[in-house]
Image (cartoon, rainbow, N blue to C red):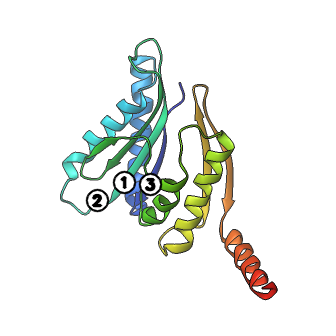
């Protein structure tokens, strides 16, 4: 079982700090118990660590995703959790976090079906991040795509979407000239 992946949104210093704290605690758990903590357990741990800071200026929103399963776990399969700085922990099948979320959800809500191939899912995820980064001034330009399976996770690609915007703009301009 691979460790869960964590993406964050919020104040960069807060996010970096809490990702390091969570990584440390997950490693300590593994050393103490001889096994990795499940994705659900990692989300619960992060939630419990963040809850005392409810009402402060702490700004962290995290999604944790991974593949849980094994001899000591009752559930086997993909897991996805959202945890925010007030300690809220939600389990779901689709999350988008951050200021670009409304733009990403507009693509995800139209395109996500549960019978997609891996390549189709990657294409939709990439498009969702592209739209979010293009429309939201606070979203970055890069998209990192990971594929999670029962064998663990693999990084599929890292892409700077700024170039995609200029290609799309050029194609739109050329199409307008041809009409």
Q: Secondary structure at mark 2?
A: loop
Q: Residues within 10 Å of mark 3 (few under 14, many from 20)?
A: some
| Badge 3 element | loop
Q: Residue at x 42, y 32 (%)?
A: 39
In front of the other: 28 or 123: 123
To which residue does mark 3 refer? 96
Q: Nearer the viewer, residue 84 or 105?
A: 105
Up the image or down, 163 lies above or below 40; here it is below
Residue at the spot 47% in from the left edge and 54% down from the top edge: 109
Residue at (25, 63) in percent of width and height: 57
The disc label shown at residue 61, or none: 1
As drawn, is 65 to the left or to the right of 151?
A: left
Indicate the quadrant containing the C terminus: top left, top right, bottom left or bottom right.
bottom right
Crowd class of label 2 (few under 14; some 14 to 19; many from 20; radius 10 Å) = some
Which one is in front in this view, the residue at disc 2 or the one at disc 3?
Answer: 3
How far across and how far down the image is residue 128, in percent?
Answer: 55, 59
Q: Farthest residue in the front direction?
A: 179
Task: Report, in whole angstroms, how far the alpha carbon at label 2 lies from the one at label 1.
Answer: 10 Å
> Whole-percent x and y of residue 145?
62, 49
Q: Position of residue 77 (x, y in %)?
A: 48, 26
Distance from Cα at disc 1 to Cα at disc 3: 10 Å
Distance CA(mark 2)–CA(mark 3): 19 Å
Q: Give neighbour class at mark 1: few <14, some 14-19, many 20+ (Cα, 10 Å).
A: many
Sequence order check: which comes first, mark 2 or mark 3? 2
Q: Is residue 32 above or below residue 153?
A: above
Q: Secondary structure at mark 1?
A: strand
148 on left or right of 84: right
Kindly indicate whether the residue at mark 3 contacts the one at mark 2 (C-beta within 8 angstroms).
no
User: Which residue has dot 2 on it?
Assistant: 58
- Closer to viewer: mark 2 or mark 1: 1
Q: What x and y, as percent, mark residue 148?
A: 58, 35
Q: Compare residues 102 and 86 and report the one nearer the observer.
A: 102
């Amino acid at each position: 079982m691979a460790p869960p992946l964590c993406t964050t949104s919020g104040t960069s210093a807060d996010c970096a700090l809490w990702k390091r704290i969570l990584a440390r605690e997950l490693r300590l758990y593994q050393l103490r118990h001889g096994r990795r903590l499940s994705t659900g357990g990692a989300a619960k741990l992060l939630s419990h660590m963040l809850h005392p800071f409810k009402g402060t200026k702490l700004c962290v929103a995290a999604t944790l995703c991974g593949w849980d399963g094994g001899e000591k776990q009752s559930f086997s399969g993909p897991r996805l959790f959202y945890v925010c700085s007030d300690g809220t922990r939600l389990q779901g099948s689709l999350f988008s976090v951050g200021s670009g979320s409304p733009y990403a959800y507009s693509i995800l809500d139209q395109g996500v079906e549960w019978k997609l191939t891996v390549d189709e899912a990657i294409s939709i995820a990439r498009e969702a991040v592209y739209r979010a980064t293009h429309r939201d001034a606070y979203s970055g330009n890069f998209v990192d795509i990971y594929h999670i399976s029962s064998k663990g996770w693999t990084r599929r690609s890292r892409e700077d979407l700024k170039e995609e915007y200029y290609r799309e703009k050029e194609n739109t301009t050329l199409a307008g000239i041809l009409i």
